[in-house]
Image (spheres, rainbow, N blue to C red):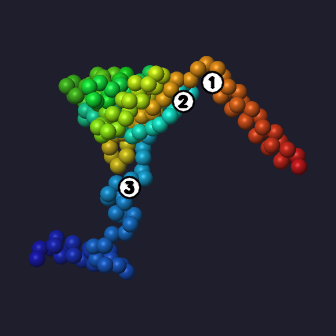
């Protein structure tokens, strides 16, 4: 047996205090397997919730180039004015801006606003296509995030809000805030 083999065995035996040699704790397993609860949000489309009634949301994978993934990891993305469209049984993210990765070589640069294919099951695409054909529905990306190391986009099936809907929503929010202020004042003086 070599010296390195002896030290490996000694290391395993030494770290197994109170448990079987080679056994991992639950936290170690989660860390190694990529904890499913860990989601790192890259960018959000906050304006979408203001401009649209969100009917349904769905998670889709993103088909990206290597330099786009590295750029996303740096947080260099923007979903303003972006949308998703269905063409020939495939879904594409249109007009989403992912900045070119600065450290990439000249040939590694990508078009920041190129159409990116979204990865969905065929049945999900058919269901979305049927809903989008209805008048007034559109597919709007809400956010881009990483889950277990994979880039994902949260798509919303949405219907546009009318101006009076937005005004009513703002008035309701202001009324709620005012009521909360009055309650907090009453609690302080009581």
Helix, strand or loop under label 2: strand
- Assign the N terminus to one quadrant of the image: bottom left
Q: Which residue is mark 3?
A: 35
Q: Earlier in the sequence, mark 2 or mark 1?
A: 2
Q: Quadrant of residue 143?
A: top left
Confirm or deny contact between disc 2 and disc 1 (CB under 8 A).
yes
**Residue toward you, 138 or 173:** 138
Helix, strand or loop under label 1: helix
Q: Position of residue 78 (x, y in %)?
A: 42, 27
Identify the residue at horizontal 38%, vertical 30% (top origin): 130
Q: Which residue is mark 1?
A: 165
Q: Which residue is mark 2?
A: 53
Identify the residue at horizontal 81%, vertical 39% (top origin): 182
**Residue toward you, 126 or 149:** 126
Q: Position of residue 123 (x, y in %)?
A: 32, 39
Q: Earlier in the sequence, mark 2 or mark 3?
A: 3
Query: How far, Cα to Cα, is label 2 from label 1?
Result: 10 Å
Q: Quadrant of residue 89?
A: top left
**Residue toward you, 61 or 138:** 138
């Amino acid at each position: 047996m070599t010296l390195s083999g002896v030290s490996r065995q000694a290391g395993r035996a030494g770290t197994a205090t109170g448990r079987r040699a080679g056994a991992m704790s639950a936290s170690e397993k989660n860390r190694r397997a990529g904890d499913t609860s860990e989601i790192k949000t890259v960018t959000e489309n906050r304006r979408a919730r203001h401009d649209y009634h969100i009917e349904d949301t769905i998670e889709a994978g993103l088909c990206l180039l290597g330099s786009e993934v590295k750029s996303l990891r740096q947080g260099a993305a923007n979903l303003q004015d972006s949308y998703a469209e269905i063409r020939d049984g495939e879904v594409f993210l249109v007009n989403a801006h992912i900045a070119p990765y600065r450290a990439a070589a000249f040939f590694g640069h990508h078009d920041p606003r190129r159409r990116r294919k979204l990865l969905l099951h065929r049945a999900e695409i058919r269901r979305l296509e049927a809903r989008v054909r209805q008048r007034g529905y559109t597919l709007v990306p809400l956010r881009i995030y990483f889950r277990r190391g994979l880039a994902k986009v949260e798509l919303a099936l949405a219907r546009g809000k009318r101006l009076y809907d937005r005004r009513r929503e703002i008035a309701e929010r202001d009324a709620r805030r005012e009521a909360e202020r009055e309650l907090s004042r009453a609690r302080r003086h009581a």
